[in-house]
Image (cartoon, rainbow, N blue to C red):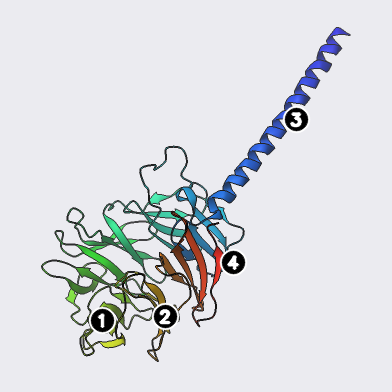
Amino acid sequence: MRLGGRWQSLVCVLAIALVAGYACSRATGEATAAQTRSICAKAAGVAAWSPDGKRIAYVGRLHAICVASADGTHARPLPYTVCTGRCRRDLPDPPLQLDWVRPKLLLYLDDFQLFKLQVGKRPQLLGTVQGGIDTFAVDARGDRVALGSSVCSLCRGPVTVLSVPAGSIVGQIGGPTADNYFPSLSPDGKRLVFIETEPQIEVWTASADGSNLQPLNECGGTPIWSPRGDKILCSGLPAKPPRRCCSLSLASPQGGLSSTLVPSGVAPNRDLAWSPNRQRVAFLTGHCGCRLAVVNVRTRQSRWLGGNGDPVSADWSPDSRQLLVAEPSPVSSNCALLWRVPADGTKPRRILNCS
């Protein structure tokens, strides 16, 4: 009987332990779910569409890369991207650029380095040529990426073209002692356009392997290759009247005269973006407090789009009907509002707030 009593006592202890363990596990799960909701409840930086247009990715709290449905619901951080504990506490700013290049592959720029993020895996540096990067550009299929060095005297170096996702070097273009920045790849990834500052500020085209380097004299600055590959969009001084500063013009990659797309009022910014269907270009207009606008490439007609202004990023949906816009909150620091902004000028829809 004593032995049986001891077993009964042991069973009771085990049962209590199991119940307590279950309760503890459930409480931990609830806390994790709550933390997950908190991390992705607010955006802290840039945003991008998925290739199929059904989801969005954005930078949430703690530098996490969050994924949500296109309307901003069902948000969750991707595994291994949440910055906790002592992780990167010295970095006050979230990732500065984000691109969803394939269904399960994202690229993002953080601390002047480019990371690849395959969904479900840990982020990794892309390649071994890193440091001093402030912009990157991907070709249409996501097979190649061009990295531009930061505009500073200690960060000079060539534009580097890497394969994706292997990270092997395809080519390095531009002088090692000059700032080479704002690269843009042709849709097939075979050609490149970029800005070089030495001996003077000029726009150049080249093959992705570094050969066939040619000046593009008709381009004033901030060059962006068109989705078809037949034109280069330039923000800067056009080659022919009206020669107004900060205009938008179209140049041929082979040279020749450029044509003015928007006469004036464009802020020279990397957030110029062609729509995938090649019919519109999104750009920033104004000089103190820039606003988002689009121009119809065929008619040359421009319109301002809704929002508070000064967007952090603007990414076209795959169907070219709307833009996913991240802009700083006017009332909350370290927080961004996310908008879905129709290109036809109808009312924008805010999908993530800072409240």
Q: Residue furthest top?
A: 2
Residue at mark 1 to residue at mark 3: CA–CA distance: 70 Å
Of pointers 3 and 4, the one earlier in the residue sequence = 3
Callout 2–callout 3 Cβ contact below 8 Å: no
Q: Quadrant of residue 295?
A: bottom left
| Element at label 3 | helix
Does residue 54 appear to the left or right of 58 in the view shown? right
Of pointers 1 and 4, the one earlier in the residue sequence = 4
Of pointers 2 and 1, the one earlier in the residue sequence = 1
Callout 1–callout 4 Cβ contact below 8 Å: no
| Element at label 1 | loop
Callout 2–callout 1 Cβ contact below 8 Å: no
Q: Position of residue 82 (x, y in %)?
A: 49, 46
Callout 4–callout 2 Cβ contact below 8 Å: no
In the image, residue 63 sits, relative to residue 249, either above or below, namely above
Circle 2 or circle 1, nearest the eye: 2
Disc 3: CA contacts within 10 A as few (<14), some (14-19) or many (>=20): few
| Element at label 2 | strand
Circle 1 or circle 3, nearest the eye: 3
Amino acid on which the number 1 mark rests in the picture:
Pro
Residue at mark 2 to residue at mark 1: CA–CA distance: 23 Å
Residue named by callout 1: 253
Q: Which disc, if any, is residue 19? A: 3
In the image, residue 350 sits, relative to residue 176, either above or below, namely below
Disc 2: CA contacts within 10 A as few (<14), some (14-19) or many (>=20): many
Q: Residue furthest front?
A: 331
Residue in view at x 34 percent, y 66 percent: 137
Residue named by callout 4: 71
Residue named by callout 2: 294
Callout 3–callout 4 Cβ contact below 8 Å: no
Amino acid on which the number 4 mark rests in the picture:
Asp
